[in-house]
Image (spheres, grey):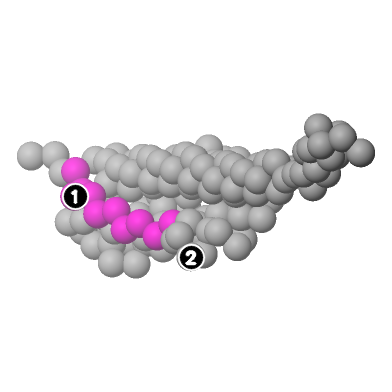
Amino acid sequence: MPRHDLRRRRRGRRRQREEGTGLVGTVAGVAVFLVLLLVAVQLLFNLYATSTVTSVGYDAARQVASDRVDHANPGAVGDAEARVERRARQQLGRYGRRVSFSWAGTDAATVRLRIQATHPRVGFGQFIARPLGFDTIDRTIVVRAEQFR
């Protein structure tokens, strides 16, 4: 058998052995990309939900602290808190069911609102959210009560 035929056969065998080796790298690259995409989606969802809940909380505390509420009357303050809390839950939509409001610490001079929410997870987000701190929102908002002078 001529020597150049042996070389062709050896090259052919090497090519057959190397076929499909790019598949492993491609699968690993796609898997890493999908994990990073999941983290990015969970992060964006967390940022949006945190800013929305915080904004609604500030609006609620400001409305209770307005000069339209008699802060010397605990009954009037309680009614205002209940009314504002219902409105805040409406503004949050379905997410409002995951939010708890605590008005403890409110007195005649300040309104104190602690708002807590739990995030729903997107896809496999339950494995990502807790280690990264994306599972809950906990904000305390303190606003001075408005008084006419």
Number of callouts: 2
Query: Is residue 115 visible in this depiction of the protein?
Result: yes
Q: Amino acid at mark 2?
A: Pro
Secondary structure predominantly adopted by residues drawn in magenta:
strand
Instruction: Find residue 119 and report its image quarter.
Output: bottom right
* Contact, mark 2 vs mark 1 (Cβ under 8 Å): no
Q: Is residue 108 magenta?
A: no
Locate residue 82 relative to residue 37 in the image: left or right.
left
Horizontal and vertical percent for residue 109?
Answer: 17, 56
At 24% from the left and 40% from the top, the residue drawn is 67
Horizontal and vertical percent for residue 123?
Answer: 68, 51
Q: In which quadrant will I find the N terminus?
A: top right
Residue 41, numbered label? none
Residue bearing the label numbered 2: 131
- Mark 2 nearby-residue class (10 Å; few <14, some 14–19, many ≥20): few
| Nearer the observer, 20 or 133 | 20
Magenta part of the protein: which range?
137-146
| Nearer the observer, 87 or 45 | 45
Q: Relative to residue 1, is residue 32 depicted above or below?
A: below
The local secondary structure at tag 2 comes to: helix
Q: Is residue 145 magenta?
A: yes
Q: Relative to residue 99, is residue 43 depicted above or below?
A: above
At 79% from the left and 47% from the top, the residue drawn is 17
The local secondary structure at tag 1 comes to: strand
Q: Amino acid at mark 1?
A: Arg
Residue bearing the label numbered 1: 144
Sequence order check: which comes first, mark 2 or mark 1?
2
| Nearer the observer, 137 or 112 | 137
Horizontal and vertical percent for residue 142?
Answer: 24, 54
